[in-house]
Image: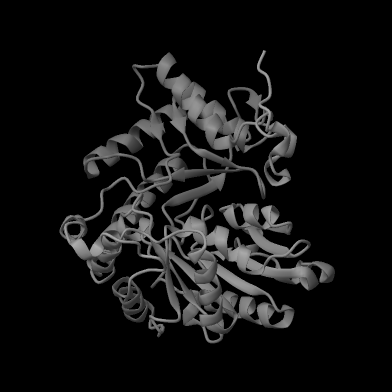
Amino acid sequence: MSVDPWFQTLFADRIGGASYGKSTDIYKFEKIKRAKRKALAEHPERQLLDFGIGENDDMAPENVRAALAREANKVENRGYADNGIQAYKDAAAEFMKRQFGVTLDPVTEVCHCIGSKPAYAMLPACFINPGDVTLMTVPGYPVAGTWTKYLGGEVVRLPLKAENGFFPDLDGIPADVRKRAKLLVINYPNSPTGAVATTDFYKRVIDFAHKNQVVVVQDAAHILLSYQGAPLSFLQVDGAKEVGVEVHSMSKGFNMIGWRLGFVAGHPKIVQAYADVKDNSDSGQFMAIQQAAAAALRDPSIPVAVKTKYERRLRKLVAALGQVGFDCAMPGGTYFLYTRSPKGAAGRSFANAEEASQYLIHEQSVCCVPWDDAGAFLRFSVTYIAADEAEEDRLMAETVSRLKGMSLTF
């Protein structure tokens, strides 16, 4: 029998206090990993069709990797970057101007982040006191909410429902909640629903922010993977910079998964507050990586190629899943397809999307991610490994073949 260490009672309440490490709850992504391992062990003859991966399957482009190698050998790039080198901020501002027509001061209105994830941890630290509220859309990326709770704040979840176009119902937020709210965290193109923002929606967000004195944090990680017209930045809309910031990532649109780099852009006072918290949290990303990312930002062909590939794969997946009964359509953005979960298969019923997801993995080694936050939905990612279009087509045919034999009901 294990014995608690002497410091067991010293753990902070925010991570469970004296009960830290004793929970038997399993995070859904861990459940998926375990199910994948079991399927591979029990059916080594059957290829795992992995639509659960949420990261680009390609390496960063050759010219970006070459820039990293070159910059890594320069002595001037050896030190701490602190809040970022000016070369990267300049490139980010140039990118925002070229791509979106947004003018930013690269000195005061842009600051780098070691990937967007730390930015969503640090921005609540700029605003949230005990009792304050962060408004967050769900399903979605939870980090800003986790840190809001760490800081003694409260998270109010705004469900994204199909009948509302996967936009939050801002008018339905109770007055007492709006009064305590300090942050509104949104994410468009939305992960995982694939919905894209409209200018009208952003105008309503800006109006809501002014009326309720709420700071907006817009997560733009998937912005370059937009399929319904040109990508739309929150900062393109008049008044957006007055009420918030937009967080960009080098990962999705530039195949720089794992390089850990992005930037926060918008109101200079919010950027300054973020930079001050950041200055007390990290010492900046390796300068050679920032230089390489600057080269990527100045190459408009990279995101075009990435978008073209994932748009092609999504169209193929929509057609494949449609053949076996899923009611799905081409998403407006992201590399995810978010579709209603089957209600049952082969005479059995599913209580929720998680149960359906586990059934697909165990029975046919088809892996996807369940979301039960606002109805029962499954998320299929097109970031699977495939060497060429012929391999993509083979995988789609295999997916149809396996799912057809499951007698799925919807």
Q: Nearer the viewer, residue 342 or 236?
A: 236
Which quadrant would residue 122 be assigned to in this image?
bottom right
- The quarter of the rendered structure image containing the N terminus is top right
Work out whether residue 352 or residue 28 is closer to the camera in this orientation and state it.
28
Q: Is residue 269 visible?
A: yes
Is 220 on the left or on the right of 316, as rendered? right
Q: x and y percent of residue 7 in the render?
A: 68, 33
Residue 72, x across and y down, in percent: 20, 57
**Foreground pick, 300 / 394:** 300
Please state the horizontal and vertical placement of residue 379, each as a whole percent of the image.
51, 44
Q: Residue furthest right?
A: 176
Query: Is 173 rendered above or below residue 391?
Result: below
Q: How is the image coloured?
A: one colour
| Rendered image quadrant of residue 63 | bottom left
Q: Residue at x 51, y 62 (%)?
A: 119
Q: In the drawing, does residue 323 fall left or right of residue 389?
A: right
Vertical position of residue 258 compared to residue 216: above or below = above
| x then y, percent, for residue 47 | 35, 25
Vertical arrangement, residue 6 with respect to residue 142, above or below: above
Q: Is residue 405 visible?
A: no
Number of residue marks: 0
- Is 194 above or below relative to 49? below
Q: At 84% from the left edge and 69% from the top edge, which residue is drawn?
A: 176
